[in-house]
Amino acid sequence: MPTVTFGNRSCELAQGETVLDGLLRHDIPAVHACKTGSCGSCMLRAVSGQVPEVSQIGLKDAWRARGYFLPCVCRPTEDIEIGETAGDIRVAARIASLVPLSGNVLQVRLVLDGPFEFRAGQYLTLIAGDTLARSYSIASIPSDGPLELHVRRMPNGQMSTWLFDDAHEGDAVRIQGPSGECFYVPGRPDQPLLLVGTGTGLAPLYGIVRDALACGHRGPIHLFHGALRPEGLYLVDELNALAAAHSNFTYTPTTDPIERAVAGSIPKLDGYRAFVCGDPAVVQLLKRKIFLAGAAMREIHADAFLPSAA
Ligand SMILES: Cc1cc2nc3c(=O)[nH]c(=O)nc-3n(C[C@H](O)[C@H](O)[C@H](O)COP(=O)(O)OP(=O)(O)OC[C@H]3O[C@@H](n4cnc5c(N)ncnc54)[C@H](O)[C@@H]3O)c2cc1C
């Protein structure tokens, strides 16, 4: 079986075992979250030995060339020596503020110690301590200054409990990314836009709508934000103010089933560009409904907030 050497520790992998699982089984600390090769948080660098191509899918060409790979989907067939990512992959950051937006949603603002280019609506990996990593959508637009995240409290959730109960302004974290294709691309400024999210699915949409308006989008922009209870709706004043300032923007907060709220207001979605974010089951349902209402599948951009496997 192949042996993985990481710093001064080595471990032999079991049959079919991934590098990440092998490291964790040997109590070798490794940052990780999704364990499916999508969030990228576990990325490491192959110093010697060949890693399978599948473990580099989705990585930038420049990263692949430097030997970066995703250990959560890497099952090597030969011995490899691996190392940490370089400083340009993970950006050091500090918590600038922690402000409740509702009973169970916290606004987390981060100031960064290095450059971080992103499009409003993408997501990043937030890393706290040595190994805790989770994906969060970016609610700010690049011109805002600090990066803004909206974090929902999960019962017994490792990252959200830390942020709600233990984190303080000034605490050091790291971020990695950005990732995701759910963002506004300028062009076709008269196309109607539909943005739909539940819970903290509002975070990327809050960035996308402000980005589209800043880019001069002229077509109608409809934002629907759903929550189970009225207290789950947040940024209501800010979004109402945005709607008052832009005649092409309408904002609909709702506690009704979100797909019904959308269908009741806009039954036909031919020609629309849609952005859908939040709970995975709701995102799946909305994508289907929006397609059936006439939007082309290539015009439906979605981020499902899948739970971490950690
Ligand atoms: C692309 C992407 C973007 C995301 N953006 C955001 C965001 O903007 N804001 C935000 O709050 N979260 C977002 N998430 C979810 C986030 O990454 C974490 O999964 C979430 O914050 C819970 O982390 P935790 O450490 O607090 O809980 P964990 O310690 O990971 O989980 C605690 C318990 O809760 C369960 N659990 C976790 N998530 C869910 C869920 N969604 N449904 C049901 N059970 C669950 C776990 O299985 C576990 O039993 C996003 C996820 C993805 C993949």
Image: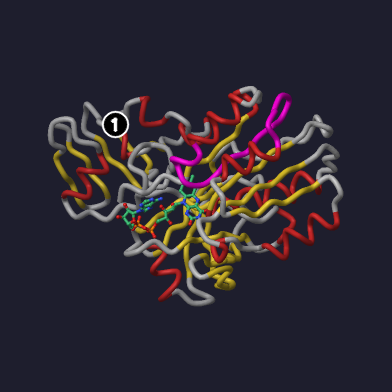
Residue at the spot x=58%, y=47% of the render?
197
Residue at the spot x=70%, y=28% of the render?
268
Q: In this view, does 257 lie to the left or right of 17?
A: right
* Residue at the spot of label 1: 49
- For the residue pair 147 and 241, the one nearer the viewer reads as 241
Q: Give the image location of residue 169, x and y in percent.
A: 53, 76
Number of numbered discs visible in the structure rendering: 1
Q: Is residue 187 magenta?
A: no
Q: Give the image location of residue 62, x and y in percent.
A: 53, 34
Secondary structure state at the residue bearing disc 1 = loop
Q: Give the residue type that dot 1 points to.
A: Gly
Q: Dividing the image into 4 quarters, which one contains the N terminus? A: top left
Instruction: Tell me the quarter of the picture where residue 221 sits.
Output: top right
State which region is magenta: 266-283
Q: Is residue 62 left or right of residue 51?
A: right
- For the residue pair 291 and 187, the one nearer the viewer reads as 291
Label 1 Cα neighbours within 10 Å, binned few <14 / some 14-19 / many ≥20? some
Instruction: Tell me the quarter of the picture where residue 248 sits.
Output: top right
Q: Give the image location of residue 175, x and y in percent.
A: 50, 56
Q: Give the image location of residue 40, x and y in percent.
A: 43, 42
Q: Give the vertical position of 101 relative to 248 (above or below).
A: below
Instruction: Tell me the quarter of the picture where residue 163 sits.
Output: bottom left
